[in-house]
Structures are given as structure tokens and as C-alpha cells.
Image (cartoon, rainbow, N blue to C red):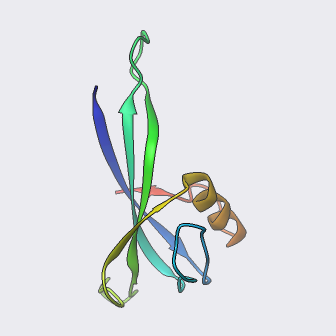
Amino acid sequence: MTTRTRQSTVNFRRSFALSGLDERMPAGSYKVDIDEEAIDGLSFQAFRRTQTLLLTPALNAEGGTPRGPAQMFVIDGDELAAALAADGLEAPAIKEL
């Protein structure tokens, strides 16, 4: 089975919380990895999301340096999209790298 990982960055203007996180996260830019697997048996290439990972800490606006120790959390991609919408961000909320 073919798998791939898409990497993107999300930007929050305000602090946010997700059920997969230990604590409320501060505003900032976060890297997101989306793991996907190919759907076999179709006449065209299609992928389904299998896992969404949020990499912390947030990056500083000045130079993109991390603000704390690095951690990776498995999160719900739909919950991430809802948190971005609640933050008042318009599409595209998740930007491909």
C-alpha cells in the first residue's frame, strides 16, 4: 500500500486547545504532518488521511525559532480545522509546505 506524508503550517492568532494536547497552546505557527494512504481499486489516485500530527512548540514570528521543547501530538484533523475556524481564520487554513 502506498503511503505519503504531507507537511503544512497552521497559524493561530489566539491560544487554542485540542483534545489530543496536554494543555492549552499559545498563539503562533505550528507544523502539521498529515499521513495518508492510497485507496486501492479506484480508476484514479486518491488518498485517505490516517493520522494528523501537530508539532510543538509554536515558532516565534521573528526568524521562526522554537519557543520551548519539541513535542509531537496525534490530533483529530477535523478538530484542528474547527479550532482554526474558531480562531477566525479563513480558507485555506492549512497551508501546504
**Where does residue 69 sit, x and y in percent of width and height?**
31, 86
Q: In this rendering, is residue 78 above or below 67?
A: above
Q: Residue at x 32, y 82 (%)?
A: 64
Q: In this rendering, is residue 92 above or below 58?
A: above
Q: Judge by depth and name the residue closer to the eye, 45 or 17.
A: 17
**Where does residue 32 sit, x and y in percent of width and height?**
41, 61
Q: In this rendering, is residue 27 above or below 87?
A: below
- Which image quadrant is residue 61 in? bottom left
How many discs appear?
Answer: 0
Where's the C terminus, which quadrant? bottom left
**Where does residue 34 sit, x and y in percent of width and height?**
40, 50
Q: Judge by depth and name the residue closer to the eye, 92 or 46.
A: 46
Q: In this rendering, is residue 83 above or below 69?
A: above
Left or right relative to 74: residue 1: left
Q: Residue at x 50, y 57 (%)?
A: 94
Left or right relative to 95: residue 85: right
Where's the N terminus, which quadrant? top left
Q: Residue at x 35, y 48 (%)?
A: 6
Q: Judge by depth and name the residue closer to the eye, 56 or 74.
A: 74
Q: Residue at x 44, y 76 (%)?
A: 29
**Where does residue 58 sit, x and y in percent of width and height?**
42, 81
